[in-house]
Image (cartoon, helix red, strand yellow):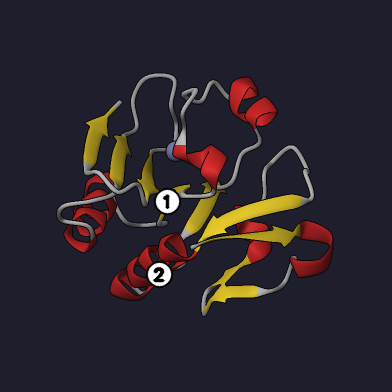
Amino acid sequence: MIRQYSLAKDSNRKLAPSFSAREFRCRDGTDTVMVDEALTVVLQCIREHFGKPVVITSGYRTAAHNAVVGGAKSSQHLLGRAADIRVPGVSVEDVAAYAESLMPDWGGVGRYPVKAGRATGWVHVDTRANKSRWTL
Ligand SMILES: [Zn+2]
């Protein structure tokens, strides 16, 4: 179930025990925030498995912002079904492998490891129906 929130009204609203609506906001400041409930469940599982904060660097994106950041045209971020995350002190591989264990035959998991020109790695997690895996 994809739900719609208002950053102005729901900023501090808890969507899961460790996640507030504002953490999923579009970084262009748009008031509307779309978030799939299933995504908050997956992220909460990751939070509890590692026992560390899950930092969301990109959640919901408007089409305009998605274009600015070079996102795929049919990005799951546009639907509120995706989050780019990192868990401080935990490797991209370990976060991605655990996310995959939560969604063995569905969902998207993308690995974005540290490399030249990329100081910080991250993992993309989304709740699409069909299984998708990639490394970029
Ligand atoms: Zn992403």
> Identity of the amino acid at label 2?
Val
Q: Nearer the viewer, mark 2 or mark 1?
A: 2
- Which of 134/93 is in front? 134
Quarter holding residue 41:
bottom left
> Identity of the amino acid at label 1?
Arg
Callout 1: 10 Å neighbours few (<14), some, many (20+)? many
Quarter holding residue 89:
bottom left
How far across and how far down the image is residue 97, in percent?
19, 52
Q: Identify the mark at residue 3; answer none if there is no mark.
A: none
- Which of 63/97 is in front? 63
Whichever of labels 2 and 1 marks the residue nearer the N terminus, that label is 2
How far across and how far down the image is residue 56, in percent?
52, 52
Q: Report helix, strand or loop for mark 2.
A: helix
Identify the residue at horizontal 52%, vertical 80% (top origin).
17
Q: Identify the mark at residue 41; answer none if there is no mark.
A: 2
Q: Which residue is mark 1?
A: 86
In this rendering, would 126 be left or right of 34? left
How far across and how far down the image is residue 132, in percent?
24, 38
Identify the residue at horizontal 84%, vertical 61% (top origin).
8
Picture layout, residue 20 above or below residue 59: below
In this rendering, would 42 be left or right of 64? left
Ligand 1 picture quarter: top left
